[in-house]
Image (cartoon, rainbow, N blue to C red):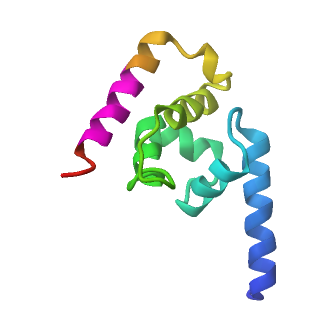
Amino acid sequence: MNNPEDIIISQKANINRLARQLKNVGPKLAQKLVDAGIDTPEKLKALGAKEAFDIIYADGDAYGDYNAAYLYALEGAIRGCDWLEIPDSLKEEYKRYAQHLQSRKGK
């Protein structure tokens, strides 16, 4: 398994597996999770949505922004539900958290 092609195939298999196992998680988010070493649902659950978000979006998304939608997706993945089913109070908490991170961005 030291062949670089085998490693790439194995990593893609991990990404696809994780995307299938976790609700709200597509290939791009699964890639970010695997790249961060969060390669099983159990690891995500152990970290929680905020800590996982902090790890994979330490510098924001591709545009440098902090989007609460990613927190919703992670929380839904942990709970095994659609992100729309997350309690509004928790969504508000996540929205405030993302806004806080965004406000610190320029400092």
Query: Which residue of the protein is positioned furthest toward the top in this rendering?
Result: 88
Q: Is residue 1 magenta?
A: no
The total number of labels drawn is: 0
Image position, residue 24 (x, y; %) = 68, 33
- Residue at the spot x=80%, y=82% of the render? 5
Image position, residue 61 (x, y; %) = 48, 51
Magenta residues, as a range? 93-103
The answer to whether residue 1 is visible is no
Majority secondary structure in the magenta region: helix
- Residue at the spot x=55%, y=60% of the render? 37
Query: Which quadrant is the N terminus positioned in?
Result: bottom right
The answer to whether residue 21 is visible is yes
- Residue at the spot x=67%, y=26% of the render? 80
Query: Which residue of the protein is positioned furthest toward the bottom in this rendering?
Result: 3
Image position, residue 45 (x, y; %) = 54, 37
**On screen, residue 47 above or below 99:** below
**On screen, residue 80 above or below 54:** above
Q: In the drawing, does residue 13 fall left or right of residue 77?
A: right
- Residue at the spot x=73%, y=51% of the render? 27
Q: In the drawing, does residue 31 fall left or right of residue 49?
A: right
Q: In the drawing, does residue 79 fall left or right of residue 107?
A: right
Q: Is residue 102 magenta?
A: yes
**On screen, residue 62 above or below 6:** above
Frontmost residue, 101 versus 45: 101
Frontmost residue, 32 versus 11: 32
**On screen, residue 77 above or below 12:** above
Q: In the drawing, does residue 3 fall left or right of residue 53?
A: right
